[in-house]
Image: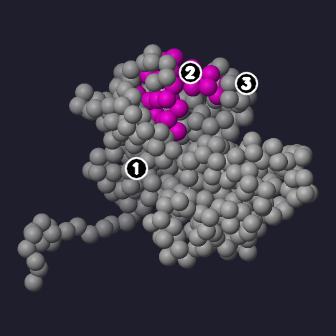
Amino acid sequence: MKYDIKDLKLAKKGKLRIEWARQNMPVLDFIEERFRRQKPLKGLRLAACLHVTTETANLMRVLKTGGAEVYLCASNPLSTQDDVAASLVKDLKIPVFSIKGEDNKIYYQHIKAVLDAKPDITMDDGADLVSIIHKEGKLNPLGGTEETTTGVIRLRAMENDGVLKCPIIAVNDAETKHLFDNRYGTGQSTLDGIIRATNRLIAGLYVVVCGYGWCGKGVAMRSKGMGAKVIVVEVDPVRGLEANMDGFQVMTIADASKIGDIFISLTGDINVIRREHFAKMKNGAIVANSGHFNVELDIDGLKKISKNRRVIREFVEEYTLPNGRVICLLAEGRLINLAAAEGHPAQVMDMSFANQALSAEYIKNNYKKLENKVYKIPEDMDKNIARLKLKSLGIKIDTLTPQQKKYLASWQEGT
């Protein structure tokens, strides 16, 4: 089911928004300049399953400039920006299989549509492309990339089980990705989505953050900055201790469910907030998810204990419990920052998508030497992206003197 362009105004709007995002993606521009000259991806078919946003559109342009034949579908039923999809089809002639609000059946039809192109390289945001390739066993790509923590977890599980059939570059694990995109991008865009959906004041509320990985750290930090009283829920003792030392209350979800005003899940796991927790929540509690899949919330459990539900405003579904209290579920439990807002700001996606573009080039140049494993991005590539970002910001850093390098390489004690 190919995206159907019928509204030229929609495409024009998307084109302008894509240009606006590009103004804050200088690292991608640096890469595009080289890709235009060298065409390092020439002859490659590339299938991408990513959130169809203005930032993604700029990545697609760079990949096509590098010579790739690009196909795009959405990695979440609610994350597509239709005007962006329209512009990609009309202005860049890139096939896009995606429309905001598609149901699960159409969602997977779109994923299979990009796989029908028989891609040489996959570009995933949640590992859906690679998962379906492995289940059906019809394709054998040179390799792929993965954008998310959730996807990397799935792929490492496949590697550990000995079923991974192609090398994967874990873009998510690049320092220029998770230290910035996950922390600053998710931190800001999650609260942006919640505020757009609810128009609630964050200051003074108890915000419960489930998961204190890089995404959770970002949400906790930004919530605190907006005046919230932040509670962190964790299962990892080191992260729980870190959250405590960062100044947050740390407790179980069972205890936090009685206190929280806004609940945000960011773990990558299933049923983090369950039926018994919904039953304890105060009247008007808001529940959102910023992990990749909506399985983090036990939505079926919430439905079973509710006597009534209604959509009270866009992206807000109100569930009424038998005792009269209401729980407000945002965006069907899907990624709140992309469903109700626009996702991460272009400034951080600039680095994330620079990693994607360079990883595609790396796979083409090195796939014969790579095993069927999940690989970290080469350190020199990661640091080069950081250097380019600093250059674009007009920031200079120091370099080690020969004496300093010699000292650091020595095993003898300094005197």
Q: Is residue 157 magenta?
A: no
Q: Residues within 10 Å of mark 3 (few under 14, many from 20)?
A: few
> Is residue 198 toward the left or the right of residue 188 in the image?
right
Q: CA distance from mark 1 to mark 2?
A: 27 Å
Q: CA–CA distance between discs 2 and 3?
A: 23 Å
- Where does the image place residue 6, in percent across and percent down from the top left? 73, 24
- Depicted 204 relative to depicted 181: above or below: below
Chain-order first, disc 1 or disc 2: 2
What's the magenta region?
Answer: 106-133
Task: Answer with the quarter of the image where residue 300 lies.
Answer: top right
Q: Quadrant of residue 400?
A: bottom left
Quadrant including the C terminus = bottom left
Give left or right: position of 89 versus 276.
Answer: left
Q: Which mark is residue 112?
A: 2
For the residue labelled by badge 2, is the local secondary structure a helix, a strand or a loop? helix
Q: Nearer the viewer, mark 2 or mark 3?
A: 2
The percent coordinates of residue 154 (x first, y second) are: 47, 39
Q: Amino acid at mark 3?
A: Lys
Element under disc 1: helix
Q: Secondary structure at mark 3?
A: loop
Q: Which residue is mark 3?
A: 6
Amino acid type, callout 1? Asp
Position in image of residue 186 (x %, y %): 57, 56
Q: Residue at x 56, y 52 (%)?
A: 267
Assess disc 1: are there few (<14), some (14-19) or many (≥20) residues with their C-alpha within 10 Å of its C-alpha. some
Q: Circle 1 sits on which residue?
A: 173
Q: Earlier in the sequence, mark 2 or mark 3?
A: 3
Q: Is residue 123 magenta?
A: yes
Instruction: Give whichever of 376, 137 is nearer the camera.
Output: 137
The type of residue carrying mark 2 is Lys
